[in-house]
Image: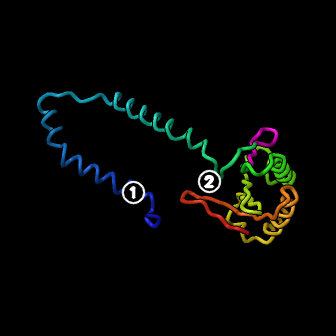
Amino acid sequence: METIPRALFPGVYVPLIALTRSRLQETVIREKLESGAGVASAWSITGFSLSGLVLTLLAFIPPSLLIPPFGFSGQRLQFGQDGSHVVYCDEKIPPEAAGKVAQFFLSEGYFEAGSPGVVELKLKGERCVVSMPVFRTYWTDSETLGWLAGVRIEIEGFVDRETHIILVDEDLRRTYRKEL
């Protein structure tokens, strides 16, 4: 399924549904119309269609806004003047350490004013794992990798543990991860 382009599916199932409708219902519809049955108003059909669209959007959009990005989990701590920066951390990491990490990212410019930022802090065994969204195009950039080495050292001081950084990025198909 991953190799089949998603845009191909409507191009296949719409003609199949039209073919199925014409084979199974066309004679029934023609007989009803010939016997004098009325045709629904286009306005009522439009109203039902728009109502269905609104209900569908209301069913899917609010829950999707509640799902953390990149599959992050843990306690959600908000930082910054407008609370737009989020650190997800597990219960083993003290909120003070998460606050220091958030302040560090604010001072480094990783969390920018007016642009929501997010990271995840987890303890795995004796080490701290920091997952950070970074565009994949920068995953091999020497300047970015040098900056991330400094980030790792700083965070080790905040959590008092060996720290590993995982870079995350996502597109419409999946979430990508690379451990440094």
The structure residue drawn at horizontal position 49% and vertical position 37%, both measured from the top left corner, is: 59
Q: Quadrant of residue 32?
A: top left
- Dot 2 alpha-carbon crowd within 10 angstroms: few under 14, some 14 to 19, many 20 or more: few
* Number of the label disc, if any, that sits on residue 78: none
Q: Earlier in the sequence, mark 1 or mark 2?
A: 1
The spot of residue 24 in percent (x, y) is: 18, 46
* Mark 1, residue position: 9
Q: Disc 1, disc 2: CB below 8 Å?
A: no
Badge 1 element = helix
Residue kind at label 1, given as amino acid type: Phe
Badge 2 element = helix
The spot of residue 12 in percent (x, y) is: 34, 57
Relative to 57, does residue 100 appear above or below in the rendering? below
Q: Magenta residues, as a range?
A: 78-87
Q: Give yes or no for residue 82 being in the magenta stretch.
A: yes
Relative to 172, does residue 41 appear above or below in the rendering? above
Whole-Å distance between the Cαs marked 1 and 2?
26 Å
The structure residue drawn at horizontal position 39% and vertical position 57%, both measured from the top left corner, is: 9
* Mark 2, residue position: 71
- Comparing 154 with 146, the one in front is 154
Locate the N terminus by quadrant: bottom left
Left or right of 136 in this view: 64:
left
